Amino acid sequence: MCIREIKESVIEFFIKISGFIIILFVFLIFLFLLNDAVLLFKDFPLKEFIFGKRWLPISNPPHFGIVPLLLGSLYVTFFATIICVPVGIASALFIAEIAPKFLRNILKSFIEILASIPSVVLGFVGIVWLGPFLKDTLKLNTGMCGLTGSFLLALMALPTIISISEDAIISVPKSFKEAAFGLGATRWQTLWRVVLPSASSGIIAAIMLGIGRVIGETMVVMMVTGNAPLVPKSILQPLRTLTATIAGEMGEAISGSEHYFALFAVGLVLFIITFIINFLSVILLSRSKK
Amino acid sequence: MNLARIRERIAFTILGLSTLFVILPIFAIVFYIVKNAIGAISWNFILDIPRHGMREGGIYPAIVGTICLVLGTILFSLPLGIMSAIYLVEYANDNFFTKLVKVSIVNLSGIPSIVYGLFGMALFVIFLKLGTSILSGCLTLSIMSLPLIITATKEALEAVPFSFREISLSLGATKWQTIRYCVLPYALPGILTGTVLSLSRAAGETAPILFTVAAFYLPRLPRSIFDQVMALPYHLYVISTQIPNMPLRLSFATAFVLIVLVFLMNLVNVILRIQFRKKKQW
Amino acid sequence: MSEVIIKTVNLNVHFGKQHILKNINLEIYKNEILGIIGPANSGKTTFLRALNRLNYLFKDYYQEGEIFFAQKNIKDINDNLLRKKIGIIFALPQVLPITIYENVAYGPKIHGIKDKDTLDSIVEKALRKAYLWEEVKDRLHTLATKLSGGQQQRLCIARTLAVEPEVILYDEPCSGLDPISTQKIEEAMRELKNNYTQILVTNNTKQAARATERCAFMLMGELVEIDRTAIIFTSPKDKRTDEYVRGVFG
């Protein structure tokens, strides 16, 4: 009897600790990023990091202006969003409301397959096929540019957007739809005027989570966007994102150097951006569930 | 009314076409890789080490490396993931701490994989002096896979009827006995599918292992958890961007093997789910 | 009547802001069958579940007053031990989706019995007492969910008996069952009378009249009246009891 109680409290202790460990991880990630990131600003002004237009880590003196990288990320994210949001929401509507049940299950498993294709494989396809294809069709100087990246990123964000939007669409109460039908609306009018607005906060959350996914994606952009750390003038030019900068340069940066710390500062920026996006989308999602 | 019907037709056609736009690329990509890889796939390719600056030979060490990483990841993330899910479903009160745990899980799921890579390097490789090693890589990957495992386990636990807990407790079982004998067995299939899913993601990840474990070229098998290893996704990255004059068929073959590995894990998942549905008795 | 086994003193129960039980003072004697009757939502089930502290599974539960079991305040008894001594049969037959044998053996195993022969004999004894042994002895290792509703409910009784309780609480045990199954359960209850204290909550006044020795009438969370069953059904003191047993309301 006594042994049973001791065993019980030991297990309970470990289970409670495990919850604590999850919090600890987030805290540690933030702490370790911050810890190394602030060391950059001992010698390098914060203002120049945030507003500097040049990222030249190995020139003398080095420049760690994050603007070109931030813009690079924003460019590809923006275009990827433009591509995937309409397609994603349309597919979610089709899957949730129009497709018959068997087709729905098939489509959903295809979306799962898409979600499981490793990003590096998509990057590879970008290099050997999509890049050259876009170069030839659009008569570009190089296929390794923002647009190629945007297309692939859009593909990667689609599963997130579709599955979460679909959930939101499905959870619109049946009575809403029946009321619209009762007034003589067609199925499309019902979808467009009733279902879509009611599901809107869930759909917006889906879009935001998709955007979070795109901003954080590394391998695809590193492989296909040409990696030029310049302020991009057009999506058809090579550019470089925050993520690709860390992935591409960390191998060469000497541990403890300014460059090394600068990459942690970039990581911290990424952490903060995705934190905000996720936090907002969760608030939206919890609201849409009510 | 007629106009409305025509509009509906047009709108539904557009929605259907959009869905087609999502599905087609999946087929195209898979077909494209399979078509170009099929000639280069052989037992030799799978079981040989890479030779001549990776331009010949096989990818055996990379396959073994990825399997090591996946197995190591499960070892850390599964116990911790299950325990935190148990905490949230069975023990947590509606207080600030619980909210913090939930927010943390959401946050973990949103952190970019490359940031995990940075963190893993800073904490495991440098601070804890584990070096670039299987251990560091697995630890990094397991933190990354936690949110998926926790969410899946949570759903699986919540799906077990409340009455099962009531029965067990009313017979005088302790809370843990109840969870151990009357909840976990029925949640197990759901937990398994979530785990396999998160592992298939971990197997395809590159960014978190870049600075924590992945070796550019290491044509032998790992001897201990402190060794570096080659990994399939990183190997594909290397041969498709860093090696000049790389024979494309080998890159295709590598991509093919990686996809097959990930799809196989997904297949296991689907089978588990079907089995589960068949056996479900309540 | 013999010694008091359960006693409640000024028992008040709240769920959130709702006041479910009001000042319940009740004594339950050893080895009697006590019925608790009353219309829906009068707090019968809540009272029952307060006795083995199962109400504490709900988050906004709040309880005042004392409950004594065998002269001990149940607050001072370990929950697991208390629930072992005071078993409960739920309204709907709730069996676990495992074999018949495993369902009955679950309790003893939890309480540390590992020996196969001991478990075998406990299972057989419990099933016999619940009048189920003859019907299932050849298929002990088939799924319990395949049994009929009445059989499942008797399996629940056997499962409770297997942990050797002193008190058995029945929470409308026959509400979903046909007359024949109901009869079998009442038979089992009569058979158990010599060794167990049994408390039967029921909506069915006829069942209470048939199966119990004393009967308590509850209304809106209050204990209106408690007396010998014969008296409750023939010459109750309270007008409300009279109206209820005559079927004027409820």
Image (tube, coloured by chain):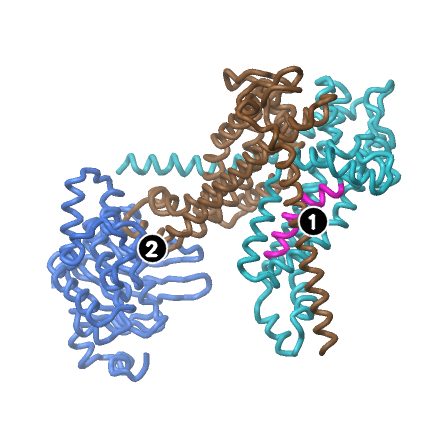
Chain colours: A cyan, B brown, C blue
Instruction: Name the quarter where the N terminus of chain B is drawn.
Output: bottom right
Q: Could you say where residue B38 lies in the image, as x and y percent from the top left?
A: 60, 33
Looking at the image, residue A154 lies above or below residue C191: above
- Left or right: B47, with A118 as reference point: left
Residue B88 visible here: no
Q: Could you say where residue B130 lies in the image, as x and y percent from the top left?
A: 57, 19
- Which secondary structure, mark 1? helix
Say what amino acid the circle numbered 1 marks.
Met
Q: Residue at x 26, y 38 (%)?
A: A1
Say what amino acid the circle numbered 2 marks.
Leu
Q: Name the residue under label 1.
A: A208
Count the labels in the image: 2
Looking at the image, residue B225 lies above or below residue C129: above
Residue C40 visible here: yes
- Subunit bearing disc 2: C
Instruction: Name the quarter where the C terminus of chain B is drawn.
Output: bottom left
Q: Could you say where residue C95 lies in the image, as x and y percent from the top left?
A: 29, 55
Residue neighbourhood size for the residue with mark 2, other residues' Cα within 10 Å, grouped as few (<14), some (14–19), many (≥20): some
Question: What's the magenta bit mostly, secondary-structure-wise?
Answer: helix
Numbered range of the magenta stretch: A150-167
Residues flagged by tags 1 and 2 on a common chain: no
Q: Which residue is drawn at 24% across and 54% down?
A: C86
Q: Distance between the residues labelled 1 and 2?
A: 44 Å
Q: Name the residue under label 2.
A: C54
